[in-house]
Amino acid sequence: MASPRPAAYNTGFANDNGCAVDSQRFQQLAEQGYNRIPVWRSIAADLDTPLSVYLKLADGPNAFLLESVEGGENWGRYSIIGLPCRRAWRATGRTLEALEYGRVIGTRDDVDPLTEIDALVQSRKAPELDELPGFSGGLVGYFGYETVAHLEPKLDFSAKPDELGVPEILLLEAEELAVFDN
């Protein structure tokens, strides 16, 4: 008979392979209508920092490191590293592009990008699990200043040339993360 693991190695995982979601729990969540179900594994990273892991894992475009701060001064509980994202959406004016691995795979012209993005968000259903931080995948990016023109039609930015070629909206779909519980 094998000796029990020391308490330091007791991860509380639901099964022996170290994964916190077993197939039964996964199936239950899917039957409840969730189409984005987090699957995770905890590992010790005592000798690493969020930045060192970012440099090791996030070698590619569309990766990110989010550090949380509480009260403007104190480090927050979680650091979230987004591994290179496969899908992205970018909008300029009334044109919304879908990208996969950096290549445009679809374009919608003469649309309200905010309405399209809202529909995208509504189509993804993820459970809130106590074991995970509030963000365990989804859209990460920015809405630039000019986005306000979609909310207030009186503001027209179309006459101003975009010399930098920066999209008004850029969102990455983060599906693979490394999360530090600080």
Image (cartoon, helix red, strand yellow):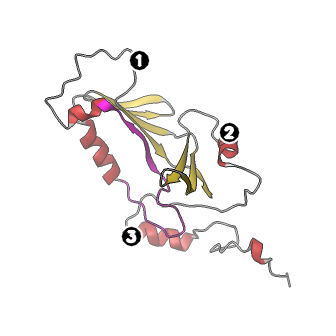
| Residue at the image point whose x is 49% and y is 30% from the top | 102
Q: Where is residue 3 in the image (x, y as percent from the top left)?
A: 85, 82
Q: Please indicate whether residue 11 sits to the left or right of residue 135 in the image.
A: right
Q: What element carries label 3?
A: loop
Q: Earlier in the sequence, mark 1 or mark 3?
A: 3
Question: CA separation, marks 1 and 3?
Answer: 45 Å
What amino acid is found at the position of numbered circle 2 in the picture?
A: Leu
Question: CA separation, marks 2 and 1?
Answer: 27 Å
Is 46 drawn above or below residue 128 in the view shown? above
Which residue is denoted by mark 1 in the rendering?
A: 164
| Residue at the image point whose x is 31% and y is 31% from the top | 145
Q: Please indicate whether residue 92 sits to the left or right of residue 182 in the image.
A: left
Which residue is denoted by mark 3 in the rendering?
A: 32
What amino acid is found at the position of numbered circle 3 in the picture?
A: Gln
Is 22 drawn above or below residue 48 in the view shown? below
Question: CA separation, marks 3 and 2?
Answer: 37 Å
- Picture quadrant where residue 158 is located: top left
Q: Which of marks 2 and 1 is nearer the N terminus?
A: 2
Q: Residues within 10 Å of mark 1 (few under 14, many from 20)?
A: few
Q: Is mark 1 on a helix, strand or loop?
A: loop
Q: Position of residue 62 (x, y in %)?
A: 53, 36
Which residue is denoted by mark 2 in the rendering?
A: 55
Q: Please indicate whether residue 108 sits to the left or right of residue 153 in the image.
A: right
